[in-house]
Image (cartoon, rainbow, N blue to C red):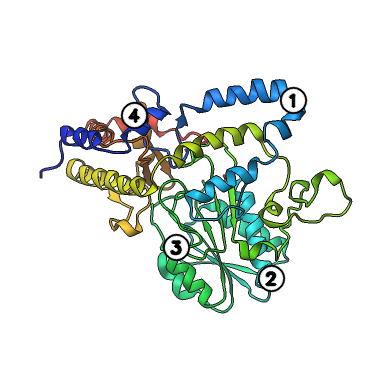
Amino acid sequence: MSFPTRADCAARDAADPLFPFRQRFHLPPGVIYLDGNSLGAMPVSTPARLQAAIEQEWGHELIRGWNSAGWYTMPRRIGDKIARLIGANPGEIVVADSTSINLFKVLSAALRLRPGRRILRSEPENFPTDLYMAQGLIALLGDQHVLELHPGDSIIDAIDEETAVVMLTQVNYRTGYRYDMASITRCAHATGALVIWDLAHSAGAMPVDLNGCEVDFAVGCGYKYLNGGPGAPAFVFVAERHQAQFIQPLSGWMGHAQPFAFDTQYTPAEGIARYLCGTQPVLSMTALECGIDLLLEADLEQVRAKSLALSDLFIELVEARCAGHGLELATPREHDHRGSQVCWRHPAGYAMIQALIARGVIGDFRAPDILRFGFTPLYVGFADVWDAVDTLVTVLETGEWRDPAYQQWAAVT
Ligand SMILES: *Cc1c(COP(=O)(O)O)cnc(C)c1O
């Protein structure tokens, strides 16, 4: 079987309009990083910006920094920047807390906006925290709701007049399956249900059009494709039409209309600010803003086109060169249903990933049997894909993944 050579891949890199972005990220030598879907790489600008935030802002401005260095307005300012990446308007997003906590806020809002409807619908392979947060909220509300799970697109036929909310992650974290946001949102609205989209694996990885799809609520991560650093704060989107109707239950003082009036009584801020809770992690937000500023320089249509080209190449090369080793493609071949990652199933997937990491090719493993490779087009090139597959071929053909050292599961996979 003929397949592209490394020289073909290098030629594609030379012609790639996004290739210069690679210089804007710090990537350790000898590493091919295929895990930007889990923790994005560090922008070159981040260390100096953080150093300045620590020494000049914290060190010199001290408490004055809340006004003089713009710390106070960060959640809304950075939220407005994220809005430009995902088809939202200014004033519809704040950066705050974690994705899990933001899910709690919007799930609460959605259930409150649909009184009398009992059912939350999601999929069994949704990221567990999304399901756990729904379970916790249902228990808190006295078990009057149920969470029903439907695999893949079968959820479309299940949405009915009893459905309060449909909660899905646009790109499945394990298989990379990408849902059709516009059509599922339309189906939900046709029966009067609301939608919550988790954008953990799509914000910054591809164009997203929240308002074009009339999405009600969305959440997403700062540390994945937004390159905000480990544990970076998350974001929450609430369509403007829903903002005034509901006070989210985590009614902390930063979501108050006048936090510094120090009132006894909670009065929510107007607009999206009521989705804030407590004091923001300024240093983490500073790092997040570096990642977002860099992404705002890129054309997300180009990012999406390159992501599909990289993942097509990866699939083609693995199928041509690793046949007979039992890897089974878990990611859809159709572009419309693919995110920015490619996954393979293999019972020894964990050990294979460890052996790859030992050779500098960093992907990750998702139980029970998924080898996951993320393609972040701003810093991954075509020759990288070729080299990664070449390393995989070595790992499989030598059988070095059978080394007992690679069978020991670490705490974080
Ligand atoms: C990564 C991820 C999360 C992470 O949530 P945290 O609260 O940041 O730990 C949530 N949902 C999905 C779909 C994810 O992929």
Q: How many marks?
A: 4
Q: If you read the primary sequence from the N terminus, does the residue marked by circle 2 or circle 3 appear first?
A: 2
Q: Amino acid at mark 4?
A: Asp
Say which residue appears at 15% left-offset and 40% top-offset.
Answer: 4
SS under mark 2:
loop
On screen, residue 351 above or below 191: above
Q: Amino acid at mark 2?
A: Gln
SS under mark 1:
helix
Pointer 1: residues within 10 angstroms few (<14), some, or many (20+)? some
Residue matched to label 1: 62
On screen, residue 82 above or below 157: above
Percent x, y for residue 363? Answer: 38, 37
Q: If you read the primary sequence from the N terminus, does the residue marked by circle 1 or circle 4 appear first?
A: 1
Percent x, y for residue 219? Answer: 56, 53
Residue matched to label 4: 403
Q: Amino acid at mark 1?
A: Leu
Tell which tag, 3 or 1, sits nearer the viewer.
1
Q: Do tag 2 and tag 1 residues touch (Cβ < 8 Å)?
A: no
Q: Amino acid at mark 3?
A: Met
The residue lying furthest to the left in this view is 1
